Amino acid sequence: MTGVAYESTLYSYRVFGCGGETSTEIIMNAMIKAYEDGCDIVTLSLGGPAGWAYDILSEVGTRIAKQGRVVTIAAGNDGYAAVLVHYSRS
């Protein structure tokens, strides 16, 4: 395989069941597991339009980042609603 990080190892942690729902605890455990597995980058694409500014998941992400890892979380996956929230904050 060729690309920017062709020698990298990708990990995937399933957090959603068949119904498309999950809990904060399951997501938090997946983030911690990624950290414990030695992932240099932890990225999540499951944010909502309100963001995670005051959520326990933001605290877990902050603690992982303070250990030298990169943590990224989607600003929102709700399409147009995410755009509206973005513009309403500026």
Image (tube, grey):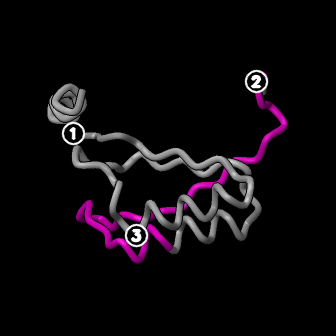
Q: Is residue 41 left or right of residue 21?
A: right
- 12 and 85: which is toward the camera: 85
User: Which SS class for mark 1?
Assistant: loop
Neighbor class of circle 1 (other Cα within 10 Å; few <14, some 14-19, many 20+) is: few
Q: Which residue is mark 1?
A: 78
Closer to the chain start, of discs 2 and 1, is 2
Percent x, y for residue 79? 21, 32
Q: Nearer the viewer, mark 3 or mark 1?
A: 3
Which residues are the magenta region? 2-28
Q: For the residue marked with disc 3, what is the amino acid?
A: Ile
Q: For the residue marked with disc 1, what is the amino acid?
A: Asp
- 53 and 12: which is toward the camera: 53
Among the 4 quarters of the image, the one containing residue 84: top left
Q: For the residue marked with disc 2, what is the amino acid?
A: Val
The image quadrant where one finds the C terminus is top left
Q: Nearer the viewer, mark 2 or mark 1?
A: 1
Does the magenta-highlighted stretch encompass residue 5? yes
- 6 and 72: which is toward the camera: 72
Numbered disc total: 3
Percent x, y for residue 60? 52, 67
Percent x, y for residue 6? 80, 31
In the picture shown, does residue 78 fall above or below 13?
above
Looking at the image, which residue is at 23% across and 64% down? 19
Percent x, y for residue 32? 60, 70
Q: Which residue is mark 2?
A: 4
Q: Which residue is mark 3?
A: 56
